[in-house]
Amino acid sequence: MNNNTNNPSNSNTPSTASGTVASFSPGLEGVVACKTRLSHVDGAGGKLVLAGHNAITLAENNTIEEVWFLLHEGRLPNAAELHAFRNRIESLGQMPADEINLVKKLRGAEPLSAFRTALSAIANKRGYKPWLGRPAKEAIDEIMALCALAPAIVEVLHTGRRPRLKKDDAGYAERYLWGVTGKKPSKDDVRAVETYLILTMDHGLNASTFASRVAASTGADVGAAITSGIGTLSGPLHGGAPGPVLDMLDSIASPDQADAWVRAQLAGGTRLMGFGHRIYRTDDPRSMCLKRVAERQNGPRIELAKVTEQTCLNVLAEKQCQRAAAEGKAVRALRVNVEFWTAVVLEHVGIPRQLFSSTFCASRIIGWGEHIAEQIQDNKLFRPLSIYTGEMPAE
Ligand SMILES: CC(C)(COP(=O)(O)OP(=O)(O)OC[C@H]1O[C@@H](n2cnc3c(N)ncnc32)[C@H](O)[C@@H]1OP(=O)(O)O)[C@@H](O)C(=O)NCCC(=O)NCCS
């Protein structure tokens, strides 16, 4: 094993085309890889901005379609624009019979894998081609069409039935919830889901958004770019966390067992799902917003969830302090992230836990779509460097 990965004078140290020696940041931590007008995560201040607006204010007051329009156009819609945009999303969201049959065949697989495969199959069936060399508008229309299908794809995969037509005048959030629960949801439940979907719609250059942009930067078709995002979202460190959060609450079962359970998990080297974040160094504002939703719901899990949250925070803080003292480093606080309270809120509205990641996908797909469109309109191929750690051939 060649051990010279940090020595810039070695010949296997990467350099750019201009000869500049590149620096290495594991996990690209702290690396800026693109510009975006879509969202900004202020990790130190605990703020999330969506296209010039406070995301929490949007999540508490606006609809998915309004925020989608905001990301798409850079401003909130007036009443007529909103009406037209809602109709467009609703109409694009109707899945033709042959596509319903295609999606039905994927039932039985793990839901997010099935979603990924369904979306990819639909893009292929529609004949979507690499965007490079075509007018950007064509690709952007294709993105919109795929994103609008998300509620119907999840519904068909979950129920095996063709989606109900129209569902009264339901918007995206209501259609999604109605589709997966099979019954007309209450206004409060729709509002809770809408809040969640807006909060998670976009979040800077997170791993799945980055993956989508990387795929788009090659000129690939938009179905491939979105599918890259779904695959990346599926991991437990990203979008796969909220299901395991409920498993954790199930295992703890009663508040007096929380401390022992959490300590045992950490002693066994298991990460606590729903805690920690690469960017936030203070409270994740999305989590605080969803906690307020959960408190309003006041479901049977609420007391256990609150005690578990506090216990996890206390034990993690203790561990981080011990670690910092042992290593002589500053304490890195681990806070609750968006996934913990997501689990409590989504369970309360009747979304089964195996659909939590698909629900996240039904929101983040809008962010991926807008990022892919942004990439298409100002493209530069992503092509970072790597440090070669193998042997060099004898000259
Ligand atoms: C989200 C996450 C991947 C961010 O990680 P990151 O900023 O890259 O930080 P690292 O993975 O390098 O973790 C730094 C240290 O903090 C610890 N840590 C971070 N999150 C932790 C958690 N949830 N539970 C226990 N320890 C944690 C790690 O063990 C690590 O120590 P190590 O170097 O000895 O392994 C990480 O916090 C995590 O795994 N959280 C749990 C999964 C989750 O909730 N994901 C949803 C994110 S919105």
Image: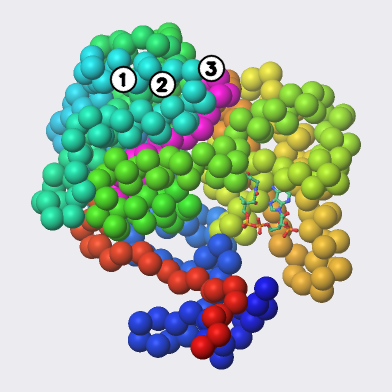
- Per the image, the residue denoted by label 3 is 350
What residue do we see at 46% from left, 13% from top? 181
Mark 1 neighbour class, 10 Å CA radius: few under 14, some 14 to 19, many 20 or more: some
Residue at the disc numbered 1? 102
Residue at left 60%, top 77%? Answer: 391
Disc 2 versus disc 3: distance between alpha carbons?
A: 23 Å
Q: Is residue 192 above or below residue 280?
A: above
Q: Give the residue drawn at x 31%, y 24%.
A: 171
Check if mark 2's residue and mark 1's residue have beta carbons within 8 Å. yes
Given the image, on which type of amino acid does mark 2 rest?
Answer: Leu
| Residue 360 visible in image | yes
Q: Which residue is mark 2?
A: 106
Q: Are the residues flagged by discs 1 and 3 in contact, CB closer than 8 Å?
A: no
Residue 130 x %, y %: 21, 48
370 with respect to 190 (left or right): left
Asked if residue 116 is positioned above or below residue 51 in the image, the reply reads: above
Q: Is mark 3 within 8 Å of ligand 1?
A: no
The secondary structure type at the circle numbered 2 is loop
Q: Secondary structure under badge 1?
A: helix
SS at mark 3 in the image:
loop
Tell me where residue 51 appears, x and y as whole percent.
Answer: 33, 53
Q: Main secondary structure of the magenta part?
A: helix
Q: x%, y% of residue 325?
A: 85, 68
| Circle 3: residue type | Gly
Q: Is residue 357 magenta?
A: yes
Q: Tell me, yes or no, whether the highlighted magenta stretch contains residue 274.
A: no
The residue range painted magenta reads: 351-372
Who's the residue at 75% across and 65% down the image?
331
